[in-house]
Amino acid sequence: MPLSDLAIRKAKPTGRTQRLFDGGGLYLEISPSGGKWWRLKYRIAGKEKRLSLGTYPDVELKPAREKRDEARKMIAAGIDPSEQRKQEKLEEAAVAAATGDTFEVVAREWMARQTVAKVTSDKNRWLLETFLFPEIGPFPIGEITPRVLLDALRKIEASGKLETASRAKIKAGQVFRYAMLEGKAESDPTASLRGALKAAKARHHAAITEPAKIGQLLRAIESFQGQVVTQAALRLAPLVFVRPGELRAAEWGEIDLDAAIWRIRPERMKMKAAHLVPLSSQAVAILRDLHALTGSGPHVFPGLRPNRPMSENTINAALRALGYSGDEMTGHGFRSMAATRLNEMGWNADAIERQLAHAETNKVREAYTHAAQYLAERTRMMQAWADYLDALRDNNNVLPFKARAG
């Protein structure tokens, strides 16, 4: 029985893929996540094949039937519509390559105009070059349909990289929206792919937040038997709770030990905005000791390779050496530790967020005025936090909640 618009609208996803047949080889495929795709099943040269005719509701029932009829005419004439489509795409890619409006060209232009931290820039380039350019890079960006993009993303998904597939979809969307602003594309095909990919299991940075366990961790850090520089980084991490990349690449030129302040340059921050870290007396003491060892070079925590900072894996590797698995504690977890405990201790939530360098805005990227918000309160908070950690490490009795916030 042929399909109707009402039957299509009423069709709901189930736990398995459904196929609603219309006639002449045309059917609507409904995925468990709710995506709906028109497909044509046909035979040519003795082989059964399938042709994608677009997604519903972008392509409604009547246009889908028209596409089916056009494809069947080609089949009757001995032309394989799938092969014809591939040839047309190759021709379009050749034209786009000549005009410069391929997905890859536009994506590289977008990357060049981004003002993000180097680590973010490197990740963007890796994601695009590894997963998207090989699949859709040569095609005209204005001609890439939701189905073409989905096929590329499904290949990533099929390899088990669910989170990577999701990130690739987000990155592609950013490129397409840039292309729309530049007049090189009229739409963003990722908008039609909501729910089309399998959801990746949420990943959270493991963190220890229970006071007694924090004390145990701090005592373990004090007993660390590895490199002196690594132990200093471990000791400093909970006191400053910056992002791991900001800590490991710290430079002596940023730190004023006499003024007890660490001024991180905008280009080193995730959101490209300057950041100030008030240093507690405990943090200053650690840095003064370390300066005698590494102060002759630019990096506070130099790596084994000349003129390079500590490796990004060093802190996590040290935590593993102390017996903490990746599900228990990570270098990034010191931020969650501080955020959780400081909020429970009653400190100003806005001051905590500012110290975590959250909610930064483009308007203030080149100024320290935003970085200095709540600075007096943050200075008191950082010293109180260091004193609190000392008490936990020494196993002294401390108030677990609603500590006086000054």
Image (cartoon, rainbow, N blue to C red):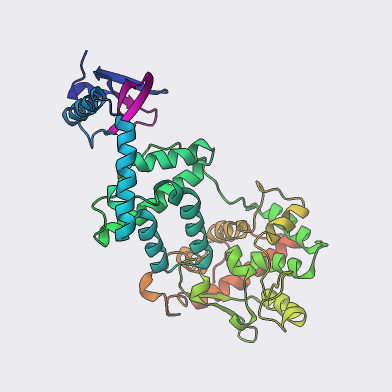
Residue 119 is left or right of residue 97, and the answer is right
Q: Residue at x 48, y 54 (%)?
A: 129
Specify start and end residues of the magenta stretch as a single range. 28-53
Q: Quadrant of residue 256?
A: bottom right
Q: Residue at x 37, y 43 (%)?
A: 149
Q: Quadrant of residue 264?
A: bottom right
Q: Residue at x 65, y 46 (%)?
A: 327
Q: Position of residue 220 (x, y in %)?
A: 78, 58
Q: In the displayed structure, would residue 122 be above or below residue 294?
A: above
Task: Find out whether residue 362 is within the magenta segment.
Answer: no
The answer to whether any part of residue 321 appears in the image is yes
Front-lying residue, 309 or 373: 309
Q: Main secondary structure of the magenta part?
A: strand
- Quarter of the figure that contains the N terminus: top left
Residue 362 is left or right of residue 128, and the answer is left
Q: Position of residue 291 (x, y in %)?
A: 73, 81
Task: Find the residue positioned furthest to the top.
Answer: 1
The answer to whether any part of residue 37 appears in the image is no
Q: In the displayed structure, would residue 176 be above or below residue 383?
A: above
Q: In the displayed structure, would residue 160 be above or below residue 251?
A: above
Task: Find the residue positioned furthest to the bottom.
Answer: 258
- Quarter of the figure that contains the C terminus: bottom right
Q: Position of residue 135 (x, y in %)?
A: 43, 46
Q: Residue at x 45, y 80 (%)?
A: 368
Q: Position of residue 206 (x, y in %)?
A: 61, 50
Q: Quadrant of residue 64?
A: top left
Front-lying residue, 406 or 377: 377
